[in-house]
Amino acid sequence: MAAYAIVGFGCAGYHAAQAIRETDSTGTIDIYSEHPDPPYNPMLTTYYASNRLRYEGMFPFGTLEEIEDNYKLHIYPSVKVTGLDAENRTLKLENGESRAYDKILLATGAYSFVPPIPNECPEASISMRTLDDARRLRSILEEGTISKAVVIGASMAGIKVVEALSNNGVKTTLVDMAPHIFPLAAYPQTAARIESELAAQGIRMKFRAGLTAVRKGTQTRAAAECSDGSVLPADLVALCIGTRANTALASAAGIQVGRGITVDPSMRTSAEGIFAAGDCCEGCNLQDGQHQIIGLWANAAYQGYTAGLNMAGGTGSFPGNILHNITHFMGMDFIGFGDNRIDGTRIQFENKEKGLWIEGVRSERRLAGINILGNCRISGILKNLILGMIQEENGDGLSDFQKGILKQEGLSHEFIRSLEGVGIHD
Ligand SMILES: Cc1cc2nc3c(=O)[nH]c(=O)nc-3n(C[C@H](O)[C@H](O)[C@H](O)COP(=O)(O)OP(=O)(O)OC[C@H]3O[C@@H](n4cnc5c(N)ncnc54)[C@H](O)[C@@H]3O)c2cc1C
């Protein structure tokens, strides 16, 4: 009977446990989680913090007891794994105990990066990643004593914090070094549209400026000092600057690590019998073949499931993905597919009646990326179109059925043709 261990119980760890149990009905599966809660969706934490979601709503897979029962697992909540002996496939626990396994999965996720800047007001600063971060923001909002906030980082996480603050009547300024919002996903014109909608909803924005220090405030609790010399008074400074992969266990065990743990498409690391999945490891960006941190929920699920399958003797492979974001905030739906750094012929479409805006880039006779504002129903079709073009040297294009859906959702015949490359010379 095989013995499996999973370190970290988020989206990747959960899907790995599911795949192991579906493939091996008898092996033992031990799961170590450093916190006491079930796997949660970090994308939902700000909804809980702003009282728009019940506490239970953050746990998409149920309670620990339910999950343990469903998949016959041994879950060890509030147990941190502190060491890994890769050669002997042994985990060291906080209490000093060592346990050996046949296969081990590292699914340790990522942590919020806090820049090494002077911070005179840690009590007025927050990050947003964990349940503790969410509880802290919620209690701050419930106290109702903050009136001004600064959010650093115009990312998917940053905008969710802006939304939570703004919904609670806090005057909020969003700050980023980049020239526009969602610098890793949005094209400039789409970003400009999002920014003007945010401004209309009372959000202030400052771009091309980074945080250099958090100082004590005079009228407010703190003040955010920025690289352009400005000082923004704030009762709360939210640091949503980015994340870093939790790679410490792997590095200390001599496993190959780049920006995240290095894995092959079967999620094997450089050490025999040790796998990694989710935000702690790298994935392949199918558009350039480069390995990078992907940092997305769906990616963590696919990687986790693939790892579990292979750990239990099945065969699965996750070649990678294109960069993609689907997010809803402040009444807007933003969808971004593909690498927005790729240059080429720009195509744009607007249907004012339907509140729909689409901006794309074609490069080397294929669609390299697309931004959609105002419609998430067409996202699957357009993502598959890009993926098909990348994986199958132009793919099959759009079926008549797909074209019919796009037309029904408000796209014009001409724009649909330009998505496929008809009439575009690039
Ligand atoms: C605010 C926010 C907004 C986001 N928005 C989006 C979005 O719009 N779209 C999208 O696709 N993705 C989004 N993401 C990213 C997405 O949530 C993550 O990619 C995904 O949750 C990663 O899952 P994971 O299982 O790899 O990691 P995690 O969920 O981080 O789970 C890892 C777990 O391992 C535990 N752990 C770590 N080390 C140890 C140890 N030594 N011992 C025991 N346990 C350990 C951690 O406590 C954690 O519970 C967002 C994330 C945040 C924070």
Image (cartoon, grey):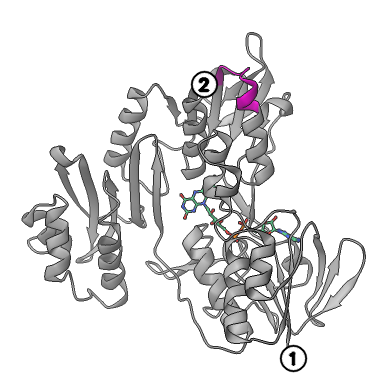
Relative to the observer, which residue lies in front, 162 or 191?
Answer: 162
Q: How crowded is the residue under tag 2: few (<14 C-alpha within 10 Å), some, or many (20+)?
A: many
Res 267 visible: no
Q: Is residue 153 left or right of residue 88?
A: left
Relative to the observer, which residue lies in front, 177 or 101?
Answer: 101
Relative to the observer, which residue lies in front, 58 or 66?
Answer: 66
Q: Position of residue 397 (x, y in %)?
A: 18, 71
Point 70% across, 73% down: residue:
73
The disc placed on residue 1 is 1
Q: How crowded is the residue under tag 1: few (<14 C-alpha within 10 Å), some, or many (20+)?
A: few
Q: Which amino acid, mark 2?
A: Val
The disc placed on residue 325 is none
Q: Which residues are magenta?
A: 140-148
Q: Which residue is mark 2?
A: 170
Secondary element under disc 2, as helix, strand or loop, is loop
Res. 16 image quadrant:
bottom right
Q: Position of residue 107 (x, y in %)?
A: 65, 66
Give how far apart the Cα atoms at labels 1 and 2 are. Answer: 56 Å
Q: Is mark 1 within 8 Å of ligand 1?
A: no
Point 62% across, 60% down: residue:
10
In this picture, is 184 found above or below 70?
above
Q: Position of residue 45 (x, y in %)?
A: 57, 43
Q: Quadrant of the C terminus?
A: bottom left
